[in-house]
Image: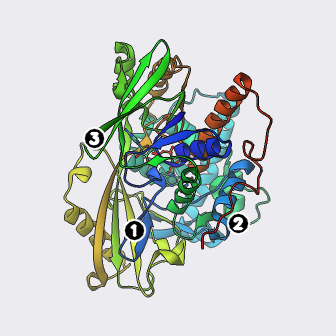
Amino acid sequence: MNVVLGAGLSGLSAAAWLTRAGKPVAVIEKNRHVGGLARTITHGDFHFDLGGHRFLTENQQVQSFVEELLGNALLKVPRKSRIYINGRHIDYPLSPANAVFGMGLAATGAILLDYGKEKWRNIIRPRQLHSLEDWVVSQFGRTIFNLYFKNYSEKVWGIDCRHISKDWVAKRIDGLSLRQFIQHSLKFHTQKNKTLTDTFFYPRKGIGQLSDRMSDLVKSRNPVTTGAGVERIFHAHGSITGIQFSDGGKTHSMQGSTYISSIPVTRLLEKIIPSPPGPVRRAAARIRFRSLVIVALFLNKQSMTDLTWMYFPGKEIPFGRIHEPKNWSSDLAPAGKSHIIAEYFCNRDDRTWQSADDALAGSTAHHLQKLGFFDQKDILDSCVLRIPYAYPVFDLHYRKHLKIITDFLDGFANLHLVGRSGMFSYLNMDQAMESGIVAAQQIIQDCRKKDPVPATSDNIFIPGHLLQPDYS
Ligand SMILES: Cc1cc2nc3c(=O)[nH]c(=O)nc-3n(C[C@H](O)[C@H](O)[C@H](O)COP(=O)(O)OP(=O)(O)OC[C@H]3O[C@@H](n4cnc5c(N)ncnc54)[C@H](O)[C@@H]3O)c2cc1C
């Protein structure tokens, strides 16, 4: 039996792959619903993600898997986003008119001058790059850093850009140069960069439809138990020997041959019995996750924007980003109505997290009304959700601590870490799925070595034969 801890996209991908290969697998999920961060919440006739989740991948295997799962429920959606800076709405990616009128001629000139300066500096006297600030300034120049990156990054992480590791931004906008950025802005780009892409994929019923279909695939042969939090993980002689989980007050035990964990790595370490050694526990105490508060406002209004996302880097607005779900799929709001979802980046011990729901909804409504999105009379209802493990925080020291942790966990031959908080890695959905698939493939390969069986359509992945969807 293969045991999967957590039914987010990474855990479900692993379980789906093992199921397809005819391997026994049991998925244990703490929440009542599958999907983890990539789930879709239903509130009356409205549906929304925990912050809009666009799907994009360069991995053809993952793309085929998603197309196979969703069939004609997978929409191709145009992307149009804006950044609200100093009272101006600036298109992102920049349009030619915005490049000049949005930022102004002086700022455009300063961007080009700074960029040239940095390129020379990189040739003449290259510097060691440690922080997000070092990296962005060296790639794009200081004016772009101050305009676009500084405030937003500090809002996301809650720490100064000099203390954020370059790993985060380097990963997010990997391979993007100012030349590509400007070419794209002026619409004469030839090469696509994932960061600047004009369209993305999205399931008709919200991102949760993807995990629901994976869960259905697993459940066709194997159990997916929800509302069941893993509480203890036992080990002996370099192997995980069993887990204990509880659902509704009852405690259950389970033994498996392999374990795939997508639960936050710090939580995993707390649950391991016997406890990890002191240095590992201390390292775990030094890495942390940023949390997220989602405020949804439901409105008696046909439409408020034509945007995918709108970013708010400024300190005068407490949330960092909003989206209007019906711009992603018209199925997400009832006819004649719409909703706006605001994302607040925060820590669990801060004021935002601890604020009352009414206060958060009131503050969100106040700021959005001031910006002219809707009037007080349009508000039908609101809802607030708190998500504790949203972002692994890449400060300047996280690598050192993470190494101590992974060295310890690597000592368990039958434990595979997958996913965003399971691996403490800033993974997007496609990469989270890929991490699960890679773990499953490894397990399948190990089984073949031990007990060779001929490959059949049941134990290898054949694109196009993954499952026969009959969903509408
Ligand atoms: C606001 C926001 C917007 C995003 N937008 C995008 C986007 O546009 N595009 C994109 O590609 N990616 C996006 N992402 C990233 C994406 O959400 C993640 O990459 C992906 O969902 C991670 O899946 P996962 O399985 O690794 O982790 P998770 O989704 O965190 O899954 C882990 C699961 O483990 C469960 N669990 C935890 N503890 C226990 C326990 N003790 N016992 C049992 N189960 C447990 C959790 O409940 C959860 O279901 C976004 C993320 C956020 C926060």
Q: Amino acid at mark 1?
A: Thr
Q: Is mark 3 within 8 Å of ligand 1?
A: no
Q: Earlier in the sequence, mark 1 or mark 3?
A: 1
- The dot on residue 250 is 3
Q: Is mark 2 within 8 Å of ligand 1?
A: no
Q: Relative to residue 205, is residue 119 depicted above or below?
A: above
Residue beneath disc 1: 42
x, y (%) of residue 104?
Answer: 55, 66
Residue beneath disc 2: 186
Q: Relative to residue 291, is residue 469 depicted above or below?
A: below
Residue ID at (45%, 51%): 37
Element on which disc 3 rests: strand
Q: Is residue 141 left or right of residue 224?
A: right
Q: CA distance from mark 2 to mark 3?
A: 61 Å
Q: Quadrant of the C terminus?
A: bottom right
Residue ID at (74%, 50%): 60
Q: Nearer the viewer, mark 2 or mark 3?
A: 3
Residue 354 versus residue 88: which sits nearer the camera? 354
Residue 134 visible at all: no
x, y (%) of residue 130?
Answer: 52, 30
Q: Relative to residue 77, is residue 403 depicted above or below?
A: above
